[in-house]
Amino acid sequence: MNNQNRAQNGLLVLLFVILTYCGYHSVSAFVANLNFYAAKNVIEPLQSGESTVETAELSAAKSAAEAAIALHSGLALYTDMLSTVKQWQALKSDNRDAALKLLDEAELLNLTSLETRPSWPVTWANLVYIKWEKGEFDDDFLRYLNNATHYGPNTPEVHQVIAALGVYLYRNDIRMFLSNKDVLKTHIIKGIIHPKTRRTVLNTVKAAGVQQLVCSWSQGRFSAARKPLSCDKS
């Protein structure tokens, strides 16, 4: 009887440990998710151009993203969010050296994310953007660009980044533009056709004064871009 009681007590202890372990991880996952959304709620309006934020708000978003990672370090979603926050901090910084340091950190975070989801196109697009902001049009930049378009040929976030990059390169680095013309013009046109990116890409094209150039590309399978571009108006 004593042996039976000891066995039952041992099972109860084991069950308690398992339930405690599961409960801790459920709570930590919940808290991590709350922190992630706290950061996301600051960043999303910025990405859509709906608001501006103060430095203190970005610092709070950074702390929230770091807290999420501390609780669940292996989740690429959280690592990418911290990278995005650092990109915005770099964009808002008046100190070029500080901005470059933040961009270096953001790049490393995205590369860490890719260790667990190497085919995620938005992360590759973020890396393209970071390299662009750093002014580093090197072999890594080309690798990021090729992977972004390979894994996300129809992903709106990829269209938005590469379309803006394409317009910039056309105006500022024609050799780099010509070296990657097919990729760049494809995402410019697809960005105009896609309803989620149409307004942003159209504004970028019009602001740069390259509307007629893009119209000249909008033929055949890309003819759907002609109407939003007003290519056929006299």
Image (spheres, rainbow, N blue to C red):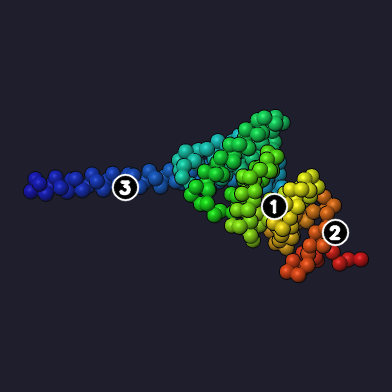
* Residue drawn at x 27%, y 45% as measured from the top left: 16
SS for callout 1: helix
Image quadrant assignment for residue 94: top right
Image position, residue 129 (x, y; %): 66, 45
Residue 31 visible in rendering: no
Q: Which residue is mark 3?
A: 19
Real-space Cα distance between discs 1 and 2? Answer: 19 Å
Q: Amino acid at mark 3?
A: Leu
Q: Position of 79 compared to 134: left or right?
A: left
State the separation of the CA atoms marked 3 and 2: 65 Å
Query: What amino acid does circle 2 point to?
Result: Gln
Q: Quadrant of the C terminus?
A: bottom right
User: Which numbered tag is attached to residue 212?
Assistant: 2
Q: For the residue carrying disc 2, how many other residues have a C-alpha within 10 Å: few (<14), some (14-19), or many (20+)?
A: some
User: As rendered, which of 110 and 79 lies closer to the eye?
Assistant: 110
Label 1 amino acid? Ile
Circles 3 and 1: CB atoms closer than 8 Å = no
Q: Is residue 46 above or below residue 227?
A: above
User: Which residue sits furthest right?
Assistant: 234
Q: Residue furthest bottom?
A: 220
Residue marked by disc 1: 162
Mark before the other along the chain sequence, 3 or 1: 3
In the displayed structure, does residue 1 sit left or right of residue 190? left
Q: Residue at x 50, y 38 (%)?
A: 67
Residue closest to the eye, 5 or 226: 226
